[in-house]
Image (cartoon, rainbow, N blue to C red):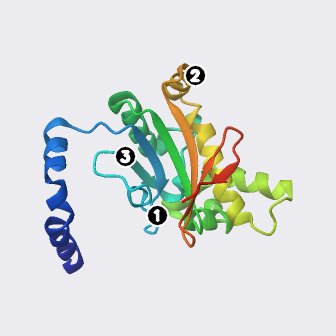
Amino acid sequence: MERLVKGYQAFRSEGYVDQKALYEELGLHGQHPDIMLIGCADSRVDPTDIFHAYPGQMFVARNVANLVPPDDLGDDYCCTMAAVEYAVTVIGVDMIVVMGHESCGGIAGCIAGLGRDPKGGYVNKWLGQINHVHERLIESGEFETDIQGAMELESVRQSLKNLMTYDFIRERVERGTLTLQGAYFSITKAELKLADDTGEFKLIEA
């Protein structure tokens, strides 16, 4: 509790002083971000910090392993998609970014079999949706030395594909009013990679 209080007090005496007018504008007139970012709940990967985004500039949804479930998976996985639907149909964002990251605990859990453990609770059920991604990489035989890194990238690609299974997203993408973008962040190097049209992740110069 002490950490929370001190953090709030520091915010009021430092950042808020310079952004008072911005907060008043957002509170009175609502938010109008152009970008939605779907990221991991991992405490080491803060999207607004990485992209230097001010309040109101980025609509963020975070979950374990930054996953987007496909449309046919059922209502049990609707929390993330509720945020996506709101961002797209109500706010009207122009871009959805799915950002994976290095040393993802959710991905490591899937590799270790947590997504196949009936006693794994909610995490088991959530990670179970990417078991097929793990199987696909294993069957390819190309990533035996770094299955973790390969899955971190492939899960982003899969989430982008899953977004396109929703009519309200696919229709906007096809009309050119919405763009989907894959991203990957290295924690140890603080480096960002963005996916090109082929799904290849390219390093962005700092």
Question: Along the line of sight, which residue is nearer the eye, 73 or 32?
Answer: 32
Q: Where is residue 86 shown, x and y percent of the image? A: 36, 35
Residue occupied by mark 3: 58
User: What is the three-letter code of the residue carrying label 3?
Assistant: Met
Q: As drawn, is 48 to the left or to the right of 188?
A: left
At horizontal 20% and vertical 77% (from top left) the residue drawn is: 1
Q: Where is residue 146 shown, x and y percent of the image? A: 75, 67
Residue lying furthest front: 206
Q: Residues within 10 Å of mark 2 (few under 14, many from 20)?
A: few
Q: Quadrant of the C terminus?
A: bottom right
User: What is the three-letter code of the residue carrying label 1?
Assistant: Val
Q: Residues within 10 Å of mark 1 (few under 14, many from 20)?
A: many
Q: Are the two marked residues, 2 and 1, in contact with CB atoms closer than 8 angstroms?
A: no
Q: Where is residue 110 shown, x and y percent of the image? A: 64, 62
Q: As drawn, is 122 to the left or to the right of 151?
A: left
Callout 2 secondary element: helix
Q: As drawn, is 18 to the left or to the right of 140?
A: left
Check the image and report above or below for 76 versus 145. Answer: above
N-terminal label among 2 and 1: 1
Q: CA distance from mark 3 to mark 2?
A: 23 Å
At horizontal 37% and vertical 46% (from top left) the residue drawn is: 58
Callout 3 secondary element: strand
Callout 1 secondary element: loop
Check the image and report above or below for 82 versus 168. Answer: below
Residue occupied by mark 2: 174
N-terminal label among 1 and 3: 1
Q: Are the two marked residues, 3 and 2, in contact with CB atoms closer than 8 angstroms?
A: no
Q: CA distance from mark 1 to mark 3?
A: 15 Å
User: What is the three-letter code of the residue carrying label 2?
Assistant: Glu
Question: Along the line of sight, which residue is nearer the eye, 72 or 83?
Answer: 83
N-terminal label among 3 and 2: 3
Residue occupied by mark 1: 45
